[in-house]
Amino acid sequence: MKKIICLLLICGTSINIIAQKSTEKNFVPTEDIVVFPITLVNAFPFISGEVNGVKGKFMFDTGNQNALDINDNLVHLPQKKTKGSGQVGSGQKFKANINDTIAEVKLADGSVYKNLLNIKSGNYDFLQNAITPDCIGYIGHDFFKEYLVKLDYLRRKITLYKNTDQRKISKDFLKGEKVLAIINFEIRRLPNHPLVRAKIGGIEMIAAFDTGQYGTFQLENKVEKLLTAKSLIVPSGQDAENDTVFTINDMILDGKFKTSLKGVYSETREDNKHVREALQITEDNIIDIGYRFLDQYKTIWDYETKKIYILEK
């Protein structure tokens, strides 16, 4: 089974829909600080919720640009209209649907949204089959784009801090935290995908951050052989599905933070060609940073200033 499964790439007919709560406000948080308890299923963070009375879990996927996507394989949406097609990074394809109105969405923090307009949905049965049978959809970037996002997998929570001028001065989101590094990222084609310059053994590459995967690498053959010879990439056994996993040693992010990744997967260029196209990655060597990194540290993602704070766990 391929280990990247959640990066949504819209192909076919282009659609760019932002969820709206009636005529009052978008499907976005309204509080200054919002805390969501999360459930980790394998590598993936989920927020409990409900759509039109159907209870389940939303994947919190930074790789998805839409505020809300609903799994219409689980939530019955008889009025959905097909508007195009989609594909995830691991290759699964689906019809992209639009729904004029979603009566009610509830989230684990107690927030309730009614009469949401123009909400995207699709048959995400691959998430039900591969990850959790009660997956009712995704929560993505446009939900939290006005916030700093703190991921804390150890304590099983996501905290959102409204990005205000006062907060830029107070930096209250760092209270009680030990900052290990502040790394800079860039954005290319998609606003929800932080790309960080990285090096392993002096070889330059690009690192893409995304909560919707375990962690992978795709390197030129000569580079992979060189790094393997230096024990900077080491095969470290097989997972439960007999896929080989690797340890990456001494990776340096943004020239300032050294780390290692255990339990990541190797990909071919063909495997991640959709990711390359979607993110406008032209570099030959790529590291996808997901759960294997995020489980080691707390992180704060500041999309406005294009910085990721790496905090002691």
Image (cartoon, rainbow, N blue to C red):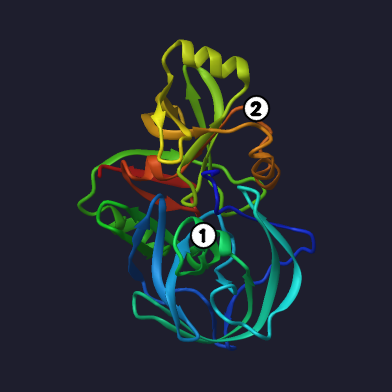
Rendered view: 253 above or below 104 = above
Tell me the number on the disc at residue 284. 2
Spot occupied by residue 201 in the image (x, y as percentages of width and height): 47, 17
Rendered view: 158 above or below 189 = below
What residue appears at the point 61 percent right and 14 percent down from the top-left corner? 222
Spot occupied by residue 309 in the image (x, y as percentages of width and height): 37, 45
Locate the N terminus by quadrant. Answer: top right
Q: What residue is shown with label 1?
A: 129
Please state which of residues 143 and 296 is positioned toward the viewer in this rendering. 296
One can see residue 250 in this view: no
| Of marks 2 and 1, the one in the foreground | 1
Q: Amino acid at mark 2?
A: Asp
Locate the C terminus by quadrant. Answer: top left
Spot occupied by residue 63 in the image (x, y as percentages of width and height): 55, 54
What residue appears at the point 66 percent right and 32 percent down from the top-left corner? 269
Quadrant in which residue 2 is drawn = top right
Q: Are marks 2 and 1 in contact (CB under 8 Å)?
A: no
Please state which of residues 186 and 65 is positioned toward the viewer in this rendering. 65
Q: Residues within 10 Å of mark 2 (few under 14, many from 20)?
A: some
Spot occupied by residue 137 in the image (x, y as percentages of width and height): 52, 68
Q: Amino acid at mark 1?
A: Asn
What residue appears at the point 55 percent right and 68 percent down from the top-left corner? 67
